[in-house]
Amino acid sequence: AQRWRNVTWVTGEAGCGKSTTARVYLQEHKEVFYILCSEDMKKGDFVREIARTVGIRTEGYNIREVWGLILDDIIQMDAPLLVFDEADKLTEPVFHYFISLYNKLEEKCGVVFLSTDYIAKRISNGLRYQKPGYKEFYSRIGRKFYELEPTDVNDVFAICSANGVTDKKDIDKVIKEASTCDFDLRRVRKSIHKVKRMVGE
């Protein structure tokens, strides 16, 4: 998405590592901007949060002017990428607003949305009830959601190894705890910390 300035929507279960992966990508690549969405965001909050993340001061400007400043900055970048985490939490007015704003971003900036698979139902309902902008937006994301595979034993093993947990008994403890929670990576992280405390790291 960053290189080709595409729009992509990635879905996965809660705790499968979407946010962590996005933050790691942000640290390892230039011109990547991470925005955590929430259900209490209004249009102004949304645009100002993008501006803040991109590094633009917003005092004294209205929303339209702030968006203009964002576009001016983004157009000058080589390969900008906006990552919207928990994007399914955006309210209907903000979602509609983004659809209209995106028309100005197209082919100037890559956009990645991260969320649970609830968004597929929301988009489907928007299409079924012919809500404004939904058909156009669905086309923009290529009429497809990229679904992450659920985490499993192999993922937990790899995460243990990457975090310095290499003793088979310790790894088995982490896997056993994680298996009770469908291998939720938040549980894996807690289990790894617990094992490390027990061995005195």
Image: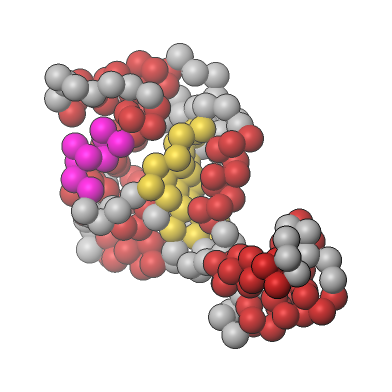
Q: Is residue 93 magenta?
A: no
Q: Position of residue 171 (x, y in %)?
A: 77, 74
Q: Position of residue 51 (x, y in %)?
A: 32, 28
* Residue depicted at x 48% and y 67%: 14
Q: Position of residue 180 (x, y in %)?
A: 59, 85
* Residue depicted at x 39% and y 55%: 86
| Magenta stretch secondary structure, dominant | helix
In what quadrant of the picture does the C terminus appear? bottom right
Q: Looking at the rendering, which quadrant does residue 69 occupy?
A: top left
Q: Nearer the viewer, residue 88 or 33?
A: 33
Q: Which residues are magenta?
A: 41-49
Q: Nearer the viewer, residue 165 or 89?
A: 165
Q: Nearer the viewer, residue 99 or 12?
A: 12
* Residue depicted at x 63% and y 78%: 178
Q: How many marks?
A: 0
Q: Looking at the rendering, which quadrant does residue 187 occupy?
A: bottom right
